[in-house]
Image: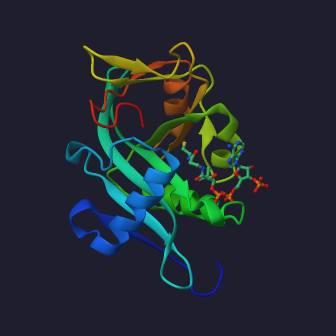
Amino acid sequence: MTPGMTIEAYGADALPAEIAAQVAALEAHAWPGAGAGHDPALTPRAMVLLDGSGAVAASLALLYKPVPLAGRTYRAAGLSSVVTRASARGRGYGGRLVAAARASLAADPAVDVALFSCDRELTPFYEAAGFTALPGAVLIGGTPRAPLATDEPGFDKNVLAAFFTADPAADRAVFTGARIPLHPGTVDRLW
Ligand SMILES: CC(C)(COP(=O)(O)OP(=O)(O)OC[C@H]1O[C@@H](n2cnc3c(N)ncnc32)[C@H](O)[C@@H]1OP(=O)(O)O)[C@@H](O)C(=O)NCCC(=O)NCCS
């Protein structure tokens, strides 16, 4: 890692105000008009990469919820709002932060699977950080009454995953090609 650079993680209640403001500014720049913050019901955590001056160069959110599939409940965590400061892109910051997020989830005994969607063109970016695409899988976001799925017309999304269970190959097979009832709610409709 570049000298002086650090990666830090915070629970929602522990995020210093100065860091929170910088994350909000990065998100507002990347997604103008999108609401700030995440649903507390998803126990969000923030991960940030700080450059040598202590400024936030990249950030992401980790969101958590149980997902029922094939008669089992998987404890899932997703990456959301992955963003690098526009002036700092292409230097590997985003990739380092996403790889650190994967390592953090892999080390978390309360997480069975990392699961999220991304625009198809970004699939290689996430694969380089250790996630793999789930062929044919569809994440169903929103709520059961107001769903939002990754195969909606006009979307061009892939589902990415990493499995941390006792039998990752078997669980990958369960998720491959499945319509996955993620249902994170109305704030983070698709993560
Ligand atoms: C995606 C993003 C976080 C990558 O951050 P970064 O710090 O530039 O990432 P890295 O330097 O580690 O990797 C850059 C690589 O990501 C890939 N990449 C980034 N954006 C891409 C895009 N829109 N299409 C295709 N590939 C892309 C490229 O392979 C790029 O490699 P290059 O520098 O050789 O061109 C950053 O571009 C960003 O903030 N984008 C806007 C917000 C966004 O789309 N977030 C993803 C939400 S799922």
Look at 32% across and 51% down and name the residue there: 110
Look at 66% across and 41% down and name the residue there: 122
Look at 50% across and 23% down and name the residue there: 150
Quarter occupied by the C terminus: top left
Quarter occupied by the N terminus: bottom right
Q: Vertically, is 91 above or below 70?
A: below
Q: Vertically, is 17 above or below 27?
A: below
Q: Position of residue 10 (x, y in %)?
A: 32, 67
Q: How is the image coloured?
A: rainbow
Does residue 132 appear left or right of residue 72 in this picture?
Answer: right
Does residue 153 appear left or right of residue 18 in this picture?
Answer: right
Look at 57% across and 17% down and name the residue there: 154
Q: Where is residue 28 in the image (x, y as percent from the top left)?
A: 43, 51
Does residue 11 appear left or right of residue 159 in this picture?
Answer: left
Q: Where is residue 58 in the image (x, y as percent from the top left)?
A: 53, 63
Task: Inspect this view and state whether residue 107 appears.
Answer: no
